[in-house]
Amino acid sequence: MIPESFIQELLNRVDIVDVVDKSVPLKKAGANYSACCPFHNEKSPSFTVSPTKQFYHCFGCGAHGTAIGFVMEYQGLDFVESIHELAKSVGMTVPQETRDVDRPAAKVVLGLQESLQQAANFYKAELKKSQRAIDYLKNRGLSGQIAAKFQIGYAPAGWQNLQSVFPNYESEALTTAGLVVENEQGRRYDRFRDRIMFPIHDQKGQVIGFGGRVINPEDTPKYYNSPETPLFQKGHELYGLFLARRAIRDAGRALVVEGYMDVVALAQYGIEYAVAALGTATTPFHITKLMRQADEIVFCFDGDNAGRTAAWRAAMNALPALTDGLKLTFLFLPKEHDPDSYVREFGKEQFEAEIKAAMPLSQYILQHLSENNPLQSQEDRVRFLNEAEPILQQINAPRSAMYLRKKVAELAQLSTEEMHSLLKLPNVNKPAVQARPKLTRTTTSLQKRFCLMMLMRPALALESDLNWIAGQAEEDVLLKQTIEICLLHPHSKPVVLLRELESKVEAKVLRELERELSMLDETLDLEKELAGTRRQLQDIYSHKQSSILLARIGEKPLSALTEDEIALLKSVGNKPSQNRA
Protein backbone atom coordinates (compact mmCIF):
# COMPACT_ATOMS: atom_id res chain seq x y z
CA MET A 1 0.00 0.00 0.00
CA ILE A 2 1.09 3.58 -0.66
CA PRO A 3 1.33 5.57 2.60
CA GLU A 4 -1.34 8.25 2.95
CA SER A 5 1.31 10.77 4.01
CA PHE A 6 3.04 10.29 0.65
CA ILE A 7 -0.18 10.87 -1.30
CA GLN A 8 -0.78 14.11 0.60
CA GLU A 9 2.78 15.27 -0.01
CA LEU A 10 2.38 14.42 -3.71
CA LEU A 11 -0.83 16.47 -3.97
CA ASN A 12 0.90 19.37 -2.24
CA ARG A 13 3.80 19.23 -4.67
CA VAL A 14 1.96 18.57 -7.96
CA ASP A 15 0.41 21.50 -9.86
CA ILE A 16 -2.84 20.41 -11.53
CA VAL A 17 -2.43 23.14 -14.18
CA ASP A 18 0.77 21.48 -15.40
CA VAL A 19 -0.80 18.01 -15.25
CA VAL A 20 -3.88 18.97 -17.29
CA ASP A 21 -2.03 21.25 -19.71
CA LYS A 22 0.16 18.35 -20.89
CA SER A 23 -2.95 16.60 -22.19
CA VAL A 24 -5.45 19.42 -22.75
CA PRO A 25 -3.95 22.82 -23.72
CA LEU A 26 -5.26 25.44 -21.28
CA LYS A 27 -5.88 29.16 -21.70
CA LYS A 28 -5.74 31.73 -18.89
CA ALA A 29 -9.23 32.89 -17.92
CA GLY A 30 -9.03 35.30 -14.99
CA ALA A 31 -7.80 33.52 -11.87
CA ASN A 32 -8.33 30.11 -13.51
CA TYR A 33 -7.57 28.28 -16.75
CA SER A 34 -10.09 26.96 -19.26
CA ALA A 35 -10.46 24.55 -22.19
CA CYS A 36 -13.11 22.50 -23.97
CA CYS A 37 -13.93 19.56 -21.74
CA PRO A 38 -12.01 16.38 -22.66
CA PHE A 39 -14.78 14.22 -21.17
CA HIS A 40 -17.69 15.31 -23.36
CA ASN A 41 -18.16 16.98 -26.73
CA GLU A 42 -18.60 20.76 -26.62
CA LYS A 43 -17.87 23.74 -28.84
CA SER A 44 -17.28 26.44 -26.20
CA PRO A 45 -15.08 25.92 -23.11
CA SER A 46 -16.84 25.01 -19.89
CA PHE A 47 -13.92 23.09 -18.36
CA THR A 48 -11.95 25.08 -15.77
CA VAL A 49 -8.82 24.35 -13.76
CA SER A 50 -8.16 26.22 -10.52
CA PRO A 51 -4.51 26.62 -9.47
CA THR A 52 -5.68 27.78 -6.03
CA LYS A 53 -8.04 24.91 -5.28
CA GLN A 54 -6.05 22.39 -7.36
CA PHE A 55 -9.33 21.15 -8.86
CA TYR A 56 -10.69 20.75 -12.36
CA HIS A 57 -14.40 21.26 -12.91
CA CYS A 58 -16.68 21.12 -15.95
CA PHE A 59 -19.83 23.23 -15.75
CA GLY A 60 -21.23 21.31 -18.71
CA CYS A 61 -21.09 17.66 -17.63
CA GLY A 62 -20.22 18.02 -13.95
CA ALA A 63 -16.86 16.23 -14.13
CA HIS A 64 -14.54 17.39 -11.36
CA GLY A 65 -11.63 16.16 -9.32
CA THR A 66 -7.96 16.41 -8.40
CA ALA A 67 -4.78 15.83 -10.36
CA ILE A 68 -5.02 12.14 -9.43
CA GLY A 69 -8.61 11.98 -10.65
CA PHE A 70 -7.71 13.66 -13.94
CA VAL A 71 -4.89 11.22 -14.70
CA MET A 72 -7.17 8.27 -13.86
CA GLU A 73 -10.02 9.57 -16.02
CA TYR A 74 -8.04 10.92 -18.96
CA GLN A 75 -5.35 8.26 -19.25
CA GLY A 76 -7.52 5.36 -18.13
CA LEU A 77 -5.16 4.41 -15.28
CA ASP A 78 -6.12 2.98 -11.93
CA PHE A 79 -5.39 4.81 -8.66
CA VAL A 80 -1.99 3.26 -7.96
CA GLU A 81 -0.83 3.72 -11.56
CA SER A 82 -1.90 7.38 -11.41
CA ILE A 83 0.09 7.93 -8.21
CA HIS A 84 3.18 6.47 -9.86
CA GLU A 85 2.65 8.60 -12.98
CA LEU A 86 2.32 11.84 -10.99
CA ALA A 87 5.20 11.00 -8.67
CA LYS A 88 7.46 10.39 -11.67
CA SER A 89 6.53 13.80 -13.12
CA VAL A 90 7.77 15.62 -10.00
CA GLY A 91 10.76 13.39 -9.27
CA MET A 92 9.29 11.57 -6.26
CA THR A 93 9.74 7.87 -5.51
CA VAL A 94 6.65 5.98 -4.39
CA PRO A 95 7.28 4.06 -1.15
CA GLN A 96 5.37 0.92 -0.17
CA GLU A 97 3.89 0.71 3.34
CA THR A 98 2.93 -2.97 3.52
CA ARG A 99 2.66 -5.68 0.92
CA ASP A 100 -0.76 -6.86 -0.23
CA VAL A 101 -0.67 -10.67 -0.22
CA ASP A 102 -2.26 -10.70 -3.67
CA ARG A 103 0.42 -8.47 -5.19
CA PRO A 104 4.13 -9.22 -5.66
CA ALA A 105 6.60 -7.36 -3.49
CA ALA A 106 7.84 -4.05 -4.96
CA LYS A 107 11.37 -5.43 -5.20
CA VAL A 108 10.19 -8.47 -7.16
CA VAL A 109 8.04 -6.36 -9.49
CA LEU A 110 10.95 -4.06 -10.14
CA GLY A 111 13.12 -7.08 -10.91
CA LEU A 112 10.55 -8.42 -13.38
CA GLN A 113 10.13 -5.06 -15.10
CA GLU A 114 13.90 -4.57 -15.37
CA SER A 115 14.32 -8.09 -16.78
CA LEU A 116 11.58 -7.61 -19.37
CA GLN A 117 12.95 -4.23 -20.47
CA GLN A 118 16.48 -5.64 -20.82
CA ALA A 119 15.09 -8.50 -22.90
CA ALA A 120 13.19 -6.01 -25.09
CA ASN A 121 16.40 -4.05 -25.65
CA PHE A 122 18.20 -7.27 -26.57
CA TYR A 123 15.50 -8.29 -29.08
CA LYS A 124 15.56 -4.84 -30.72
CA ALA A 125 19.33 -5.02 -31.11
CA GLU A 126 19.09 -8.53 -32.55
CA LEU A 127 16.58 -7.39 -35.19
CA LYS A 128 19.18 -5.04 -36.64
CA LYS A 129 21.61 -7.96 -36.95
CA SER A 130 19.20 -10.35 -38.69
CA GLN A 131 18.70 -9.65 -42.40
CA ARG A 132 16.21 -12.53 -42.50
CA ALA A 133 14.01 -10.88 -39.87
CA ILE A 134 14.36 -7.46 -41.52
CA ASP A 135 13.37 -8.92 -44.89
CA TYR A 136 10.36 -10.58 -43.34
CA LEU A 137 9.09 -7.27 -41.92
CA LYS A 138 9.77 -5.46 -45.20
CA ASN A 139 7.87 -8.13 -47.11
CA ARG A 140 4.96 -7.50 -44.74
CA GLY A 141 5.15 -3.85 -45.75
CA LEU A 142 6.42 -2.47 -42.44
CA SER A 143 8.73 0.54 -42.41
CA GLY A 144 11.64 0.99 -40.06
CA GLN A 145 9.79 3.88 -38.41
CA ILE A 146 6.72 1.80 -37.53
CA ALA A 147 8.90 -1.08 -36.29
CA ALA A 148 10.75 1.38 -34.04
CA LYS A 149 7.48 2.93 -32.79
CA PHE A 150 6.18 -0.46 -31.65
CA GLN A 151 9.68 -1.50 -30.44
CA ILE A 152 9.56 -4.66 -32.55
CA GLY A 153 12.51 -7.03 -32.13
CA TYR A 154 13.76 -10.49 -32.99
CA ALA A 155 14.53 -13.46 -30.75
CA PRO A 156 17.32 -15.37 -32.54
CA ALA A 157 17.36 -19.12 -32.97
CA GLY A 158 19.21 -21.00 -30.25
CA TRP A 159 18.45 -22.23 -26.78
CA GLN A 160 20.15 -19.82 -24.35
CA ASN A 161 20.73 -16.49 -26.11
CA LEU A 162 19.48 -14.53 -23.11
CA GLN A 163 22.43 -15.83 -21.13
CA SER A 164 24.49 -13.10 -22.82
CA VAL A 165 22.10 -10.51 -21.36
CA PHE A 166 21.60 -12.04 -17.93
CA PRO A 167 24.81 -13.49 -16.47
CA ASN A 168 22.68 -14.98 -13.67
CA TYR A 169 20.67 -17.12 -16.07
CA GLU A 170 19.42 -19.17 -13.10
CA SER A 171 17.61 -16.13 -11.68
CA GLU A 172 14.06 -16.82 -10.53
CA ALA A 173 12.99 -13.46 -12.03
CA LEU A 174 13.62 -14.79 -15.55
CA THR A 175 11.22 -17.72 -15.11
CA THR A 176 8.66 -15.60 -13.24
CA ALA A 177 8.75 -13.01 -16.04
CA GLY A 178 8.19 -15.78 -18.60
CA LEU A 179 11.49 -15.24 -20.42
CA VAL A 180 13.04 -18.59 -19.50
CA VAL A 181 11.48 -22.06 -19.27
CA GLU A 182 12.68 -24.88 -17.06
CA ASN A 183 11.88 -28.47 -18.13
CA GLU A 184 11.31 -31.51 -15.93
CA GLN A 185 15.02 -32.34 -15.99
CA GLY A 186 15.85 -28.87 -14.62
CA ARG A 187 17.35 -27.63 -17.91
CA ARG A 188 16.66 -23.94 -18.62
CA TYR A 189 16.21 -22.42 -22.06
CA ASP A 190 14.79 -19.27 -23.71
CA ARG A 191 11.03 -19.29 -24.17
CA PHE A 192 11.17 -17.28 -27.42
CA ARG A 193 13.39 -18.55 -30.27
CA ASP A 194 13.50 -17.51 -33.94
CA ARG A 195 10.45 -15.24 -33.64
CA ILE A 196 9.55 -11.64 -34.41
CA MET A 197 9.02 -10.09 -30.98
CA PHE A 198 6.22 -7.67 -30.11
CA PRO A 199 6.63 -6.10 -26.65
CA ILE A 200 3.38 -5.75 -24.72
CA HIS A 201 3.15 -2.54 -22.68
CA ASP A 202 0.99 -1.61 -19.74
CA GLN A 203 -0.74 1.76 -19.60
CA LYS A 204 2.41 3.38 -18.22
CA GLY A 205 4.42 2.22 -21.23
CA GLN A 206 6.38 -0.41 -19.32
CA VAL A 207 7.09 -3.79 -20.94
CA ILE A 208 5.06 -6.47 -19.14
CA GLY A 209 5.26 -9.33 -21.65
CA PHE A 210 5.85 -10.37 -25.26
CA GLY A 211 4.12 -11.84 -28.23
CA GLY A 212 6.31 -13.83 -30.61
CA ARG A 213 5.35 -14.51 -34.24
CA VAL A 214 7.00 -17.20 -36.36
CA ILE A 215 8.98 -16.27 -39.49
CA ASN A 216 8.86 -19.76 -40.95
CA PRO A 217 5.19 -20.46 -41.78
CA GLU A 218 5.70 -24.17 -41.08
CA ASP A 219 6.54 -23.49 -37.42
CA THR A 220 3.83 -23.66 -34.79
CA PRO A 221 2.20 -22.07 -32.97
CA LYS A 222 1.90 -19.01 -35.23
CA TYR A 223 1.71 -16.68 -32.21
CA TYR A 224 3.22 -17.46 -28.84
CA ASN A 225 2.61 -15.17 -25.85
CA SER A 226 4.23 -14.70 -22.48
CA PRO A 227 2.54 -16.77 -19.76
CA GLU A 228 0.48 -15.21 -16.98
CA THR A 229 2.83 -13.43 -14.56
CA PRO A 230 2.50 -11.01 -11.62
CA LEU A 231 2.70 -8.21 -14.20
CA PHE A 232 0.80 -9.70 -17.11
CA GLN A 233 -2.76 -11.06 -17.18
CA LYS A 234 -3.99 -11.73 -20.72
CA GLY A 235 -7.62 -11.08 -19.89
CA HIS A 236 -6.81 -7.56 -18.65
CA GLU A 237 -4.34 -6.22 -21.22
CA LEU A 238 -4.69 -5.07 -24.82
CA TYR A 239 -1.82 -4.95 -27.28
CA GLY A 240 -1.11 -1.45 -28.58
CA LEU A 241 -3.35 0.43 -26.12
CA PHE A 242 -0.53 2.50 -24.65
CA LEU A 243 0.41 3.86 -28.10
CA ALA A 244 -3.20 4.13 -29.29
CA ARG A 245 -4.72 6.15 -26.44
CA ARG A 246 -4.39 9.59 -27.99
CA ALA A 247 -5.57 8.39 -31.42
CA ILE A 248 -8.56 6.66 -29.77
CA ARG A 249 -9.57 9.90 -28.07
CA ASP A 250 -9.09 11.92 -31.27
CA ALA A 251 -11.11 9.47 -33.38
CA GLY A 252 -13.73 8.90 -30.69
CA ARG A 253 -13.50 5.16 -31.25
CA ALA A 254 -11.37 2.10 -30.54
CA LEU A 255 -10.91 -0.66 -33.11
CA VAL A 256 -10.38 -4.17 -31.69
CA VAL A 257 -8.64 -6.63 -34.02
CA GLU A 258 -7.27 -10.14 -33.58
CA GLY A 259 -3.49 -9.96 -34.14
CA TYR A 260 -0.38 -7.91 -33.44
CA MET A 261 0.43 -7.54 -37.12
CA ASP A 262 -3.07 -6.17 -37.72
CA VAL A 263 -2.46 -3.40 -35.15
CA VAL A 264 0.94 -2.53 -36.56
CA ALA A 265 -0.15 -2.63 -40.22
CA LEU A 266 -3.18 -0.43 -39.54
CA ALA A 267 -0.97 2.09 -37.73
CA GLN A 268 1.36 2.11 -40.75
CA TYR A 269 -1.62 3.18 -42.88
CA GLY A 270 -2.73 5.91 -40.47
CA ILE A 271 -5.36 3.95 -38.51
CA GLU A 272 -3.68 4.32 -35.13
CA TYR A 273 -6.64 3.60 -32.85
CA ALA A 274 -6.46 -0.21 -33.16
CA VAL A 275 -5.71 -2.64 -30.32
CA ALA A 276 -5.68 -6.44 -30.08
CA ALA A 277 -6.65 -9.00 -27.45
CA LEU A 278 -3.70 -11.13 -26.37
CA GLY A 279 -4.47 -14.62 -27.56
CA THR A 280 -7.74 -14.74 -25.66
CA ALA A 281 -11.36 -13.75 -26.19
CA THR A 282 -12.26 -10.12 -25.55
CA THR A 283 -13.24 -9.91 -21.87
CA PRO A 284 -15.41 -7.53 -19.81
CA PHE A 285 -12.13 -6.13 -18.42
CA HIS A 286 -11.08 -5.19 -21.96
CA ILE A 287 -14.45 -3.55 -22.63
CA THR A 288 -14.34 -1.56 -19.39
CA LYS A 289 -10.77 -0.44 -20.09
CA LEU A 290 -11.71 0.76 -23.60
CA MET A 291 -14.87 2.47 -22.33
CA ARG A 292 -12.61 4.80 -20.35
CA GLN A 293 -11.06 5.90 -23.63
CA ALA A 294 -13.99 6.19 -26.07
CA ASP A 295 -17.76 5.84 -26.43
CA GLU A 296 -17.52 3.67 -29.56
CA ILE A 297 -15.84 0.26 -29.84
CA VAL A 298 -15.63 -1.49 -33.21
CA PHE A 299 -14.75 -5.18 -33.31
CA CYS A 300 -13.11 -6.22 -36.57
CA PHE A 301 -12.86 -9.95 -37.28
CA ASP A 302 -11.88 -12.14 -40.18
CA GLY A 303 -14.87 -13.42 -42.13
CA ASP A 304 -13.97 -17.10 -41.61
CA ASN A 305 -15.53 -19.42 -39.04
CA ALA A 306 -12.82 -18.71 -36.44
CA GLY A 307 -13.41 -14.98 -36.80
CA ARG A 308 -17.17 -15.35 -36.43
CA THR A 309 -16.73 -17.53 -33.34
CA ALA A 310 -14.42 -14.91 -31.81
CA ALA A 311 -16.91 -12.14 -32.64
CA TRP A 312 -19.77 -13.90 -30.87
CA ARG A 313 -17.64 -14.50 -27.77
CA ALA A 314 -16.70 -10.81 -27.77
CA ALA A 315 -20.35 -9.78 -28.07
CA MET A 316 -21.43 -12.03 -25.18
CA ASN A 317 -18.55 -10.86 -22.97
CA ALA A 318 -19.45 -7.24 -23.67
CA LEU A 319 -23.07 -7.53 -22.50
CA PRO A 320 -22.51 -7.05 -18.73
CA ALA A 321 -20.39 -3.93 -19.37
CA LEU A 322 -22.81 -2.39 -21.86
CA THR A 323 -24.14 1.11 -21.14
CA ASP A 324 -26.64 3.23 -23.05
CA GLY A 325 -23.87 5.70 -23.90
CA LEU A 326 -21.64 3.03 -25.46
CA LYS A 327 -21.81 2.12 -29.15
CA LEU A 328 -20.60 -1.39 -30.01
CA THR A 329 -20.37 -2.44 -33.65
CA PHE A 330 -19.04 -5.48 -35.54
CA LEU A 331 -17.13 -5.43 -38.83
CA PHE A 332 -16.64 -8.68 -40.75
CA LEU A 333 -14.09 -8.65 -43.55
CA PRO A 334 -14.26 -10.93 -46.62
CA LYS A 335 -13.08 -14.50 -45.91
CA GLU A 336 -9.84 -14.01 -47.82
CA HIS A 337 -8.83 -10.94 -45.81
CA ASP A 338 -7.68 -9.90 -42.37
CA PRO A 339 -7.23 -6.21 -41.38
CA ASP A 340 -3.55 -6.34 -42.39
CA SER A 341 -4.23 -7.56 -45.93
CA TYR A 342 -7.40 -5.49 -46.40
CA VAL A 343 -5.82 -2.14 -45.55
CA ARG A 344 -2.87 -2.89 -47.87
CA GLU A 345 -5.12 -3.73 -50.78
CA PHE A 346 -7.83 -1.10 -50.35
CA GLY A 347 -6.21 1.63 -48.23
CA LYS A 348 -7.20 3.68 -45.19
CA GLU A 349 -10.20 5.48 -46.73
CA GLN A 350 -11.97 2.29 -47.78
CA PHE A 351 -11.18 0.58 -44.47
CA GLU A 352 -12.64 3.48 -42.48
CA ALA A 353 -15.73 3.47 -44.73
CA GLU A 354 -16.21 -0.16 -43.73
CA ILE A 355 -15.80 0.78 -40.06
CA LYS A 356 -18.55 3.42 -40.33
CA ALA A 357 -20.87 0.84 -41.91
CA ALA A 358 -20.18 -1.80 -39.22
CA MET A 359 -23.13 -3.73 -37.78
CA PRO A 360 -24.56 -2.51 -34.43
CA LEU A 361 -24.51 -4.97 -31.53
CA SER A 362 -28.30 -5.37 -31.39
CA GLN A 363 -28.50 -6.10 -35.12
CA TYR A 364 -25.63 -8.58 -34.84
CA ILE A 365 -27.31 -10.43 -31.96
CA LEU A 366 -30.61 -10.72 -33.81
CA GLN A 367 -28.88 -11.81 -37.02
CA HIS A 368 -26.84 -14.45 -35.18
CA LEU A 369 -29.90 -15.87 -33.39
CA SER A 370 -31.99 -16.07 -36.54
CA GLU A 371 -29.42 -17.07 -39.20
CA ASN A 372 -30.10 -20.80 -38.72
CA ASN A 373 -33.67 -20.37 -37.57
CA PRO A 374 -36.41 -19.71 -40.17
CA LEU A 375 -38.85 -18.56 -37.42
CA GLN A 376 -41.70 -20.14 -39.33
CA SER A 377 -43.16 -22.56 -36.82
CA GLN A 378 -44.11 -22.27 -33.18
CA GLU A 379 -41.17 -24.52 -32.31
CA ASP A 380 -38.78 -22.21 -34.21
CA ARG A 381 -39.98 -19.20 -32.25
CA VAL A 382 -39.80 -21.05 -28.92
CA ARG A 383 -36.19 -22.01 -29.67
CA PHE A 384 -35.47 -18.39 -30.63
CA LEU A 385 -36.89 -17.15 -27.31
CA ASN A 386 -34.94 -19.76 -25.34
CA GLU A 387 -31.67 -18.66 -26.97
CA ALA A 388 -32.48 -14.96 -26.56
CA GLU A 389 -33.45 -15.16 -22.87
CA PRO A 390 -29.93 -15.53 -21.32
CA ILE A 391 -28.67 -12.74 -23.58
CA LEU A 392 -31.46 -10.36 -22.55
CA GLN A 393 -30.84 -11.18 -18.89
CA GLN A 394 -27.27 -9.87 -19.08
CA ILE A 395 -28.07 -6.41 -20.48
CA ASN A 396 -28.46 -3.85 -17.72
CA ALA A 397 -28.46 -0.73 -19.91
CA PRO A 398 -32.16 0.31 -19.76
CA ARG A 399 -32.67 1.78 -23.25
CA SER A 400 -30.55 -0.82 -25.04
CA ALA A 401 -32.36 -3.62 -23.21
CA MET A 402 -35.79 -2.19 -23.97
CA TYR A 403 -35.25 -1.81 -27.71
CA LEU A 404 -33.68 -5.25 -28.06
CA ARG A 405 -36.53 -6.84 -26.12
CA LYS A 406 -39.01 -5.14 -28.42
CA LYS A 407 -37.24 -6.53 -31.51
CA VAL A 408 -37.03 -10.02 -30.01
CA ALA A 409 -40.75 -9.92 -29.22
CA GLU A 410 -41.57 -8.84 -32.79
CA LEU A 411 -39.55 -11.70 -34.30
CA ALA A 412 -41.20 -14.16 -31.92
CA GLN A 413 -44.61 -12.71 -32.92
CA LEU A 414 -45.44 -11.75 -29.34
CA SER A 415 -46.27 -8.49 -27.63
CA THR A 416 -43.64 -7.15 -25.26
CA GLU A 417 -45.99 -7.86 -22.34
CA GLU A 418 -46.50 -11.48 -23.48
CA MET A 419 -42.75 -11.99 -23.79
CA HIS A 420 -42.17 -10.57 -20.31
CA SER A 421 -44.71 -12.95 -18.85
CA LEU A 422 -42.87 -15.88 -20.44
CA LEU A 423 -39.26 -14.90 -19.71
CA LYS A 424 -37.50 -14.08 -16.46
CA LEU A 425 -35.96 -10.71 -17.23
CA PRO A 426 -34.63 -8.01 -14.86
CA ASN A 427 -36.59 -4.79 -14.51
CA VAL A 428 -35.08 -2.07 -16.71
CA ASN A 429 -37.93 0.43 -16.38
CA LYS A 430 -36.22 2.21 -13.49
CA PRO A 431 -34.80 5.65 -14.39
CA ALA A 432 -31.41 5.46 -16.09
CA VAL A 433 -28.46 6.46 -13.94
CA GLN A 434 -26.73 9.42 -15.49
CA ALA A 435 -23.00 9.19 -16.15
CA ARG A 436 -22.48 12.68 -14.75
CA PRO A 437 -24.57 14.45 -12.09
CA LYS A 438 -26.65 17.35 -13.30
CA LEU A 439 -25.62 20.67 -11.81
CA THR A 440 -28.23 22.07 -9.45
CA ARG A 441 -27.95 25.13 -7.27
CA THR A 442 -28.61 24.56 -3.58
CA THR A 443 -28.37 26.95 -0.64
CA THR A 444 -25.10 26.46 1.18
CA SER A 445 -25.47 26.41 4.97
CA LEU A 446 -23.34 28.73 7.11
CA GLN A 447 -21.48 25.71 8.49
CA LYS A 448 -20.60 24.46 5.03
CA ARG A 449 -19.65 27.94 3.82
CA PHE A 450 -17.32 28.34 6.81
CA CYS A 451 -15.76 24.95 5.94
CA LEU A 452 -15.23 26.00 2.30
CA MET A 453 -13.39 29.17 3.26
CA MET A 454 -11.31 27.31 5.86
CA LEU A 455 -10.28 24.79 3.21
CA MET A 456 -9.18 27.67 0.98
CA ARG A 457 -7.29 29.40 3.82
CA PRO A 458 -6.51 26.79 6.51
CA ALA A 459 -4.05 29.15 8.24
CA LEU A 460 -7.06 31.24 9.38
CA ALA A 461 -8.36 28.43 11.62
CA LEU A 462 -8.32 29.23 15.38
CA GLU A 463 -8.12 26.85 18.32
CA SER A 464 -10.95 28.83 19.92
CA ASP A 465 -13.24 27.90 17.01
CA LEU A 466 -13.61 24.44 18.52
CA ASN A 467 -15.05 25.92 21.74
CA TRP A 468 -18.26 27.38 20.31
CA ILE A 469 -19.43 24.39 18.21
CA ALA A 470 -22.31 22.47 19.74
CA GLY A 471 -24.39 19.54 18.50
CA GLN A 472 -23.83 16.24 16.70
CA ALA A 473 -25.71 16.92 13.49
CA GLU A 474 -24.06 16.10 10.16
CA GLU A 475 -22.93 19.68 9.54
CA ASP A 476 -21.76 20.17 13.14
CA VAL A 477 -19.45 17.16 12.78
CA LEU A 478 -18.21 18.40 9.40
CA LEU A 479 -17.43 21.83 10.86
CA LYS A 480 -15.52 20.40 13.83
CA GLN A 481 -13.52 17.95 11.69
CA THR A 482 -12.64 20.63 9.13
CA ILE A 483 -11.35 23.02 11.80
CA GLU A 484 -9.26 20.27 13.44
CA ILE A 485 -7.70 19.29 10.09
CA CYS A 486 -6.96 22.90 9.16
CA LEU A 487 -5.25 23.42 12.52
CA LEU A 488 -3.07 20.36 11.85
CA HIS A 489 -2.27 21.33 8.23
CA PRO A 490 -2.30 25.15 8.03
CA HIS A 491 -0.24 25.29 4.84
CA SER A 492 -1.81 22.45 2.83
CA LYS A 493 -3.77 22.78 -0.41
CA PRO A 494 -7.58 22.27 -0.40
CA VAL A 495 -7.25 18.88 -2.15
CA VAL A 496 -5.01 17.58 0.63
CA LEU A 497 -7.40 18.76 3.34
CA LEU A 498 -10.33 17.13 1.56
CA ARG A 499 -8.40 13.89 1.38
CA GLU A 500 -7.86 14.08 5.15
CA LEU A 501 -11.61 14.52 5.60
CA GLU A 502 -12.41 11.35 3.61
CA SER A 503 -12.10 9.01 6.57
CA LYS A 504 -13.86 11.35 9.01
CA VAL A 505 -17.15 12.35 7.38
CA GLU A 506 -19.79 10.58 5.29
CA ALA A 507 -19.04 10.21 1.57
CA LYS A 508 -22.24 12.07 0.58
CA VAL A 509 -21.25 15.10 2.68
CA LEU A 510 -17.73 15.10 1.26
CA ARG A 511 -18.98 14.93 -2.36
CA GLU A 512 -21.28 17.91 -1.73
CA LEU A 513 -18.41 19.83 -0.16
CA GLU A 514 -16.14 19.08 -3.16
CA ARG A 515 -18.83 20.25 -5.56
CA GLU A 516 -19.42 23.52 -3.65
CA LEU A 517 -15.67 24.12 -3.42
CA SER A 518 -15.34 23.69 -7.19
CA MET A 519 -17.81 26.53 -7.73
CA LEU A 520 -16.68 28.86 -4.92
CA ASP A 521 -15.92 32.38 -6.19
CA GLU A 522 -12.16 32.86 -5.85
CA THR A 523 -12.42 36.68 -6.05
CA LEU A 524 -13.97 36.82 -2.56
CA ASP A 525 -12.08 38.47 0.28
CA LEU A 526 -11.82 35.17 2.13
CA GLU A 527 -10.43 36.64 5.34
CA LYS A 528 -13.30 39.14 5.67
CA GLU A 529 -15.92 36.57 4.61
CA LEU A 530 -14.61 34.03 7.07
CA ALA A 531 -14.59 36.53 9.95
CA GLY A 532 -18.21 37.50 9.22
CA THR A 533 -19.36 33.90 8.95
CA ARG A 534 -17.54 33.07 12.19
CA ARG A 535 -19.47 35.79 14.06
CA GLN A 536 -22.78 34.54 12.66
CA LEU A 537 -22.01 30.96 13.62
CA GLN A 538 -20.91 31.98 17.12
CA ASP A 539 -24.26 33.71 17.64
CA ILE A 540 -26.18 30.72 16.28
CA TYR A 541 -24.34 28.22 18.48
CA SER A 542 -24.55 30.56 21.49
CA HIS A 543 -28.32 30.72 21.13
CA LYS A 544 -28.46 26.96 20.61
CA GLN A 545 -26.44 26.34 23.79
CA SER A 546 -28.59 28.79 25.74
CA SER A 547 -31.75 27.02 24.58
CA ILE A 548 -30.37 23.64 25.63
CA LEU A 549 -29.30 25.04 29.01
CA LEU A 550 -32.66 26.74 29.58
CA ALA A 551 -34.42 23.47 28.87
CA ARG A 552 -32.30 21.76 31.48
CA ILE A 553 -32.87 24.58 34.00
CA GLY A 554 -36.61 24.30 33.47
CA GLU A 555 -36.48 20.75 34.74
CA LYS A 556 -34.88 21.83 38.09
CA PRO A 557 -36.56 23.30 41.19
CA LEU A 558 -35.56 26.94 41.93
CA SER A 559 -33.72 25.87 45.09
CA ALA A 560 -31.35 23.70 43.02
CA LEU A 561 -30.27 26.43 40.57
CA THR A 562 -26.68 27.72 40.54
CA GLU A 563 -25.83 31.44 40.50
CA ASP A 564 -24.90 31.19 36.78
CA GLU A 565 -28.22 29.51 35.97
CA ILE A 566 -30.16 32.22 37.89
CA ALA A 567 -28.18 34.90 36.02
CA LEU A 568 -29.05 33.26 32.69
CA LEU A 569 -32.75 33.21 33.60
CA LYS A 570 -32.62 36.90 34.56
CA SER A 571 -30.87 37.81 31.28
CA VAL A 572 -33.55 35.98 29.30
CA GLY A 573 -36.27 37.65 31.33
CA ASN A 574 -34.78 41.09 30.60
CA LYS A 575 -34.67 40.61 26.85
CA PRO A 576 -38.35 41.32 26.10
CA SER A 577 -38.24 44.65 27.99
CA GLN A 578 -34.98 45.56 26.20
CA ASN A 579 -36.59 44.80 22.88
CA ARG A 580 -39.64 46.88 23.76
CA ALA A 581 -37.39 49.81 24.66
Image: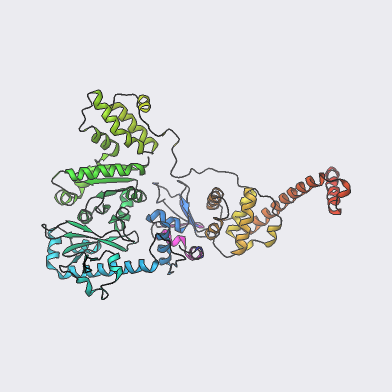
Q: Is residue 496 left or right of residue 39?
A: right
Q: Residue 579 lies in what quarter of the image?
A: top right
| x, y percent for residue 361 | 29, 39
| x, y percent for residue 18 | 43, 62
| x, y percent for residue 51 | 50, 60
Task: Please identify the quadrant where the N terminus is shown.
Answer: bottom left
Task: Please identify the quadrant where the C terminus is shown.
Answer: top right
The residue at the point 59 percent across, 54 percent down is: 452
The residue at the point 24 percent across, 73 percent down is: 165
| Residue 564 visible in the current orientation | yes
| x, y percent for residue 440 | 53, 42
Q: Is residue 403 left or right of residue 446?
A: left
Query: Does residue 357 sit above or below 123 in this rendering?
Result: above
Query: Does residue 244 sit above or below 134 in this rendering?
Result: above
Q: Residue 313 lies in what quarter of the image?
A: top left
The residue at the point 33 percent across, 41 percent down is: 319
| Residue 525 visible in the current orientation | no
Front residue of 105 and 366:
105
Query: Does residue 114 sit above or below 425 in this rendering?
Result: below
Residue furthest out toward the front: 185
Residue furthest out toward the bottom: 167
For the record, the magenta segment spans 6-31
Front residue of 406 and 339:
406
Q: Is residue 399 magenta?
A: no
